[in-house]
Image (cartoon, rainbow, N blue to C red):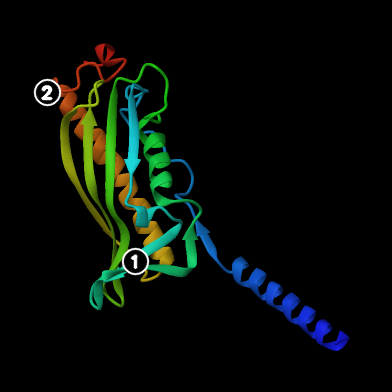
């Protein structure tokens, strides 16, 4: 009986050690170092709050991909790679760093809300050797009363340099940065047309 118990204990220790080794093999990715503020950003969007919503199946640290050539309806996750947090949270942080947005629970100076509804944020494979990052969704600007002032569809893609998790991550970060540039250009254009009067706390100083 004692021998049996000892064997069981040894097996358990071996299994734990194996699990620890496997866990150490998982590569965790974030979006890298904080990006520089976009050229025309001087805190002018500090009165705009950012809200990013994602489908429930994206609310996990998995790095998602699709094999369009095999089954485009099946969403897969890399077994040996993951994000350090849910991609929606990482994207929110990136956009705030780029544009100076605050969170939904930000300070009282917030006048407008930019809501980003993320529908797709994954690496898609057209062939086993060719893939691209795809970011799709809708951006809506809401006024102080939380009424939609204007909205637009988002559809950005970037070819991955390698057909693996690392290549997918680099491309996904690239489309995230491009999203920031497109949002900045969109908001600036809306302001020039007078749509965003009052959404920029220092708009009067920037003709």
Residue holding disc 2: 193
Q: Position of residue 188 (x, y in %)?
A: 21, 28
**Disc number at residue 22?**
none
Residue 182 appears in the rendering: yes
Instruction: Tell me which numbered mark, 2 or 1, is placed earlier along the sequence.
Output: 1
Q: Position of residue 57 (x, y in %)?
A: 36, 57
Identify the image quadrant of residue 35: top left
Q: Position of residue 9 (x, y in %)?
A: 79, 78
Q: Is residue 108 above or below residue 33?
A: above
Identify the secondary structure beneath mark 1.
strand
Residue at 32% x, 60% y: name it: 122
Residue 38 appears in the rendering: no
Mark closer to the observer (2, 1): 1
Spot the residue most to the top: 204
Q: 2 or 130: nearer the eye?
A: 2
Residue holding disc 1: 65
Instruction: Specify the quadrant that holds the C terminus.
Output: top left
Spot the residue most to the left: 193
Specify few, some or many for label 2: CA neighbours under 10 Å numbering under 14, 14-19, or 20 or more.
Answer: few
Q: Is residue 1 above or below residue 113?
A: below
Give me the C-alpha separation between circle 2 and circle 1. 39 Å
Q: Position of residue 25 (x, y in %)?
A: 58, 69
């Amino acid at each position: 009986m004692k021998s049996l118990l000892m064997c069981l204990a040894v097996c358990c220790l071996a299994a734990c050690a194996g699990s620890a080794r496997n866990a150490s093999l998982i590569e965790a990715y974030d979006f890298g170092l904080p990006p520089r503020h976009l050229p025309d950003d001087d805190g002018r969007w500090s009165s705009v709050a950012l809200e990013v919503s994602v489908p429930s199946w994206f609310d996990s640290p998995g790095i998602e991909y699709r094999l369009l050539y095999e089954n485009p309806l099946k969403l897969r996750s890399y077994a040996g790679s993951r994000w350090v947090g849910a991609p929606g949270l990482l994207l929110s942080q990136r956009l705030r760093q780029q544009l100076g947005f605050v969170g939904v629970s930000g300070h009282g100076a917030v006048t407008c809300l930019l809501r980003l509804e993320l529908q797709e944020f994954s690496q898609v494979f057209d062939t086993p050797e060719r893939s691209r990052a795809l970011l799709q969704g809708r951006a809506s600007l809401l006024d102080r009363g939380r009424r939609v002032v204007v909205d637009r569809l988002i559809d950005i893609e970037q070819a991955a340099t390698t057909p693996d998790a690392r290549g997918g991550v680099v491309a996904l970060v690239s489309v995230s940065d491009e999203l920031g540039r497109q949002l900045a250009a969109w908001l600036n254009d809306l302001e020039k047309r007078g749509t965003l009067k009052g959404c920029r706390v220092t708009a009067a100083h920037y003709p």
